[in-house]
Amino acid sequence: MENSRARFSVTARFTRALVEAITRQGGTVPEAMRQATAQEARVDMARQEALWALFVQACPDDPLGALRLGTDLQAGHLDIVGMLLLSCDTLGDALEVLTEYAPIIGDNARFEIASPGAEVQLRYVPEYLLCREQRVEAALGCVVGLARWMTNGRFAPRAVGFAHAARAEPAAYEALLGCPVHFGQEANAVVLDATDLGQGIVQAGGALHLHLRALADDMLASLAQDSVSARVQQLIREHPRWGKERIGEQLGMSGRHLNRKLAAEAISFKGLREALLHDLAKQALGAGQGSAAVGEALGFSDENAFARAFRRWAGQTPAQYAKSVRK
């Protein structure tokens, strides 16, 4: 059991969402654990499970707290996988991406697609045991919430099924998920009509999708290693103005050595940094920050340089993007 837990990990961005949820519920996260989740790119399963135990303790009178946590999650909490989902053209494409790259979010569970008849089932298969029911509810709640958001509210699942028994009144589940909910099923699954697979994603972008998919392939391949790219990613997010030499210095190596390490994982520093800066820029612009302030925070020489880079990444200006997310 200990060996199994040691080899699994979860992206720190999802873990930080869990830490925030514990705090909102009135729970307390030990400072050492809070700092560790803030500094690392991935969190080992032992600490992840300790946090889930704290979450359950923090909401003893709210049996649907985990489901609510899942429906509140945003694409950014899923790290690069969330960006990749947003860049898909259709809901069907997004489901395929999720089944392939879910291990980047947490590598001790997987998604599978089954198509019995006219319906499609996105099945969730966990390999963990601790707080299993709560974590399954959070995962399927996240799927439903993101699919609804990515289709601008058009998506409505046919049903959601859980392998475990109801932990609250079924009507309460249905009110949160917006569909019939069944318990004691053979699989944990979100069930949708086959016709839903063609629904368009609000922020589709083919070129961005190809770029992010390549980056996600590299990250997926590096999970089993002591990934330099994961540590670089975390440092870039914390210090977006830093260049290759400064990042390398923090990791105890030269910029040239860092390039070689990343090349061994089939990743370039420039490509990784630009993908992350794009993500950070979207978050800041979506939160209402001005283009000049965002560009300065991300290390661009001036607002025009930032605008040119953002147009290259997203195919639109920062102002156009900010306007689109505020609609």
Image (cartoon, rainbow, N blue to C red):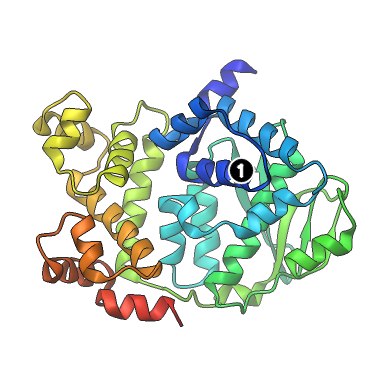
Q: Going 37% across and 70% down the picture, which residue do you hit?
A: 288
Q: Where's residue 72, x and y in %?
A: 61, 59
Q: Name the residue nearer the viewer: 110 or 236.
A: 236
Task: Name the outermost residue toward the top.
Answer: 2
Q: Is residue 308 above or below residue 115?
A: below
Q: Tell me the quarter of the picture where residue 29 sits.
A: top right
Disc 1 is placed on an element classified as: helix
Frontmost residue, 284 versus 260: 284
Identify the residue shown where x is 12% and y is 71%: 304
Type of amino acid under label 1: Thr
Tell me what residue is drawn at x 55 percent, y 67 percent. 92
On the image, the x and y values in percent for residue 185 come to 84, 51
Q: Position of residue 274 (x, y in %)?
A: 23, 55
At which x and y percent is residue 155? Answer: 63, 75
Q: Quadrant of the N terminus?
A: top right
Q: Nearer the viewer, residue 2 or 283?
A: 283
Q: Describe residue 80's horizontal placement relative to residue 200 as left or right.
A: left
Of 274 and 121, nearer the camera is: 274
Q: Which residue is rendered at x = 87% and y = 50% of the image?
A: 166
Q: Which residue is mark 1?
A: 23
Quadrant of res 115: bottom right
